[in-house]
Amino acid sequence: MTGQYAPQQAGSDPLAPALEARVQKLGKELRCAVCQGVSIADSPASMARAQLDMVRELVSQGKSDQEIIDYFVARYGEWVLLEPTREGFNWLVWLGPLLLVAGGAFVILRQIKQPPASAGATPAPPTPAPEAEDPYLQAVRRELE
């Protein structure tokens, strides 16, 4: 998708390709407030265009990537990040799926390795003597032999 950058503000100077690539990289890390779950680089919404233009302006001012991200987090909250930070309560977001898979594997392995229901607790029903069997069942057994 090189060369398919979002349009800039009218009258703004185009950025060097390396800086524009940085704008797009940062734009893919920030959530569009209107589109819910889409980055500002991928969103067609006018608010996302304005946010991406702000990223361009901050990049052209020489701000670092972390300073730009901090700028947006200060204004919109941590929600604006498409990828949550790996600290505090957010570790549940990162580790939760792994813990669920490990727990599921543990339960499955435990069920597989579990011995059959306690032997001797419920004896198997005795097989009836051949003369006590139903005559129809006796006929079927004879046919199968």
Image (cartoon, grey):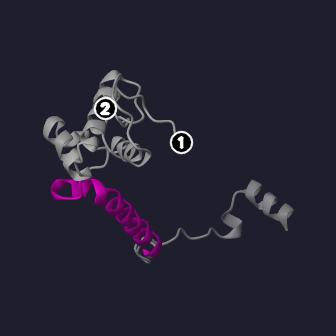
Residue at figure coordinates x 18%, y 46% from the top left: 70
* Residue 122 lies within the magenta run: no
Q: How far apart are marks 1 and 2 (CA)?
A: 19 Å
Read off the residue under disc 2: 53
Label 1: which secondary element? loop
State which quadrant residue 130 falls in: bottom right
Drawn side of residue 95 relative to residue 110, left or right: left
Task: In the rendered view, tell whether residue 96 sits above or below residue 15.
Answer: below
In front: label 1 or label 2 = 2
Mark 2 surroundings within 10 Å by alpha-carbon count, few (fewer than 14), some (14 through 19), many (20 or more): many
- Residue 11: x %, y % from top left: 34, 23
The secondary structure that most of the magenta stretch takes on is helix
Q: Residue furthest left?
A: 74
State which quadrant residue 28 falls in: top left
- Residue 1: x %, y % from top left: 53, 42
Residue at figure coordinates x 32%, y 34% from the top left: 52
Label 2: which secondary element? helix
N-terminal label among 1 and 2 = 1
In the image, what residue type sits under mark 2? Asp
Read off the residue under disc 1: 1
In the image, what residue type sits under mark 1? Met
Per the rendered image, the range of residues in magenta is 85-114
Comparing 61 with 121, the one in front is 61
Comparing 84 with 25, the one in front is 25
